[in-house]
Amino acid sequence: MQNPTTTTLGYALSVTRWLQAPLYFGLVTAQGVYVYTFFKELWTLILICVSGHATETYVMLAVLKLVDVVMIANLLITAIVGISSVHLLQMFVDVHHTSHHARAWEIPGVACMHARPHPNG
């Protein structure tokens, strides 16, 4: 039998993840802003190159700006997927029947793969 204090504390910590939901939606919104920024910068680069006004330095800096936007967007995707996979794992896998040691060291994506039944049996 579990200690009531431990159970209450665990439940309280589990419920507080919903306080972070607005932050996650903010990350998704920021991802949308970066997609818009990427296409705006790409379109500007294309227009300047087609018009013949692009210098080598301008093209290099514009491409570096595009790379920067993509790298930040990838970081946002990593954060969003990592956070959501942990919460989905907690929602869809019976964590009470998994050892604490196994839960503590599993990578969320790998843990999700282990949670599904194997197609061959």
Image: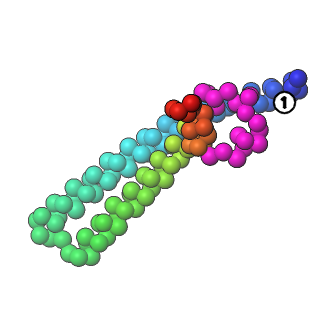
Seen in the picture, residue 55 relative to 31 is either above or below; the reply is: below
Give the quarter of the image for residue 106. top right
Seen in the picture, residue 3 relative to 43 is either above or below; the reply is: above
In the rendered image, residue 86, in percent from the top left (x then y), is placed at 60, 38
Q: Is residue 86 left or right of residue 13?
A: left
Q: Quadrant of the N terminus?
A: top right
In the rendered image, residue 115, in percent from the top left (x then y), is placed at 60, 33
Nearer to me, 38 or 117: 117
On the question of residue 1 being in view, the answer is: yes
Nearer to me, 111 or 61: 111
Q: Is residue 99 left or right of residue 2?
A: left
For image coordinates 22% across by 55% down, the residue present is 43
Q: What stretch is highlighted in magenta?
A: 87-107
| Secondary-structure class at tag 1 | helix
Q: How crowded is mark 1: few (under 14 residues within 10 Å), some or many (20 or more)?
A: few
Q: Is the magenta stretch mostly helix, strand or loop?
A: helix
Seen in the picture, residue 83 relative to 68 is either above or below; the reply is: above
Q: Quadrant of the C terminus?
A: top right
**Residue furthest out toward the bottom:** 56
Give the quarter of the image for residue 9. top right
Which amino acid type corresponds to the residue marked 1 in the rendered image? Answer: Thr
For image coordinates 63% across by 29% down, the residue present is 93
**Residue furthest out toward the left:** 51
Seen in the picture, residue 102 relative to 61 is either above or below; the reply is: above
The colour scheme applied to this rendered structure is rainbow
Residue position for label 1 = 6
For image coordinates 32% across by 47% down, the residue present is 36
In the rendered image, residue 60, in percent from the top left (x then y), is placed at 29, 72
Q: Is residue 19 magenta?
A: no
For image coordinates 43% across by 40% down, the residue present is 29
